[in-house]
Image (cartoon, rainbow, N blue to C red):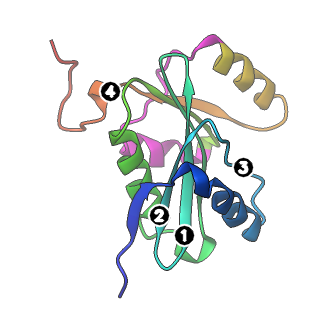
Amino acid sequence: MTAIIYAPLEAALWPLMNKFYRTHQSSMKAVREAQLWVARKEGIIAGLCLRPMAHGHWLTGLFVAPALRGQGVAGDLVSQAIAAVDGPIWLFCDPQLQGFYEKLGFSLEVELPHALHERLVRYQRNKAMIAMGLTPWCADPDQETAPQ
């Protein structure tokens, strides 16, 4: 059995991420200014984008191929990607995904940069959406308080 590899996607290969999204009829899109992360197993099976924002990153575009959902791929990909960046990380998600992200250390108690707050308000006009965040010291679930 081939192991799953979690790694950043080289900038020159970003069109492969959009091809992956299109193949699965996802409306998500990879953007050039983001760090693109993928899970590979004989091709891309999952991806996400970490877009620089304010003094941190905005996690967008998390998508796992439908046939591989429920196997821990999304959690492993998010964990690998967030471990590689500094600063806070924010995301928007459907309220049903709150528990998934909480297991990865994200919280509803988050201060969004102004630009993200405005975007969230716009998104919430059309669908249920919550904001979650992760500060660097929260990335380690065994560490309960901020470092001194």
From the viewer's perspective, tell me whether residue 46 is left or right of residue 2.
right
Q: Residues within 10 Å of mark 2 (few under 14, many from 20)?
A: many
- What residue is disc 3 on? 29
Range drawn in magenta: 96-114
Pick whichever of labels 3 and 2 is earlier in the sequence.
Answer: 3
Work out whether residue 13 or residue 145 is closer to the camera in this orientation and state it.
Answer: 13
Mark 4 secondary-structure assignment: helix
Residue 136 numbered tag: 4
Q: Quadrant of the N terminus?
A: bottom left
Tell me what residue is drawn at x 58 percent, y 14 percent: 113
From the viewer's perspective, tell me whether residue 101 is left or right of residue 117.
left
Q: Position of residue 18 (x, y in %)?
A: 71, 58
- What residue is disc 2 on? 39
Cβ–Cβ under 8 Å for marks 1 and 2: yes
Tell me what residue is drawn at x 80 percent, y 25 percent: 122
Disc 4 to disc 1, C-alpha distance: 27 Å
Q: Magenta stretch: residue 5 in it? A: no
Nearer mark to the viewer, of 3 and 4: 3
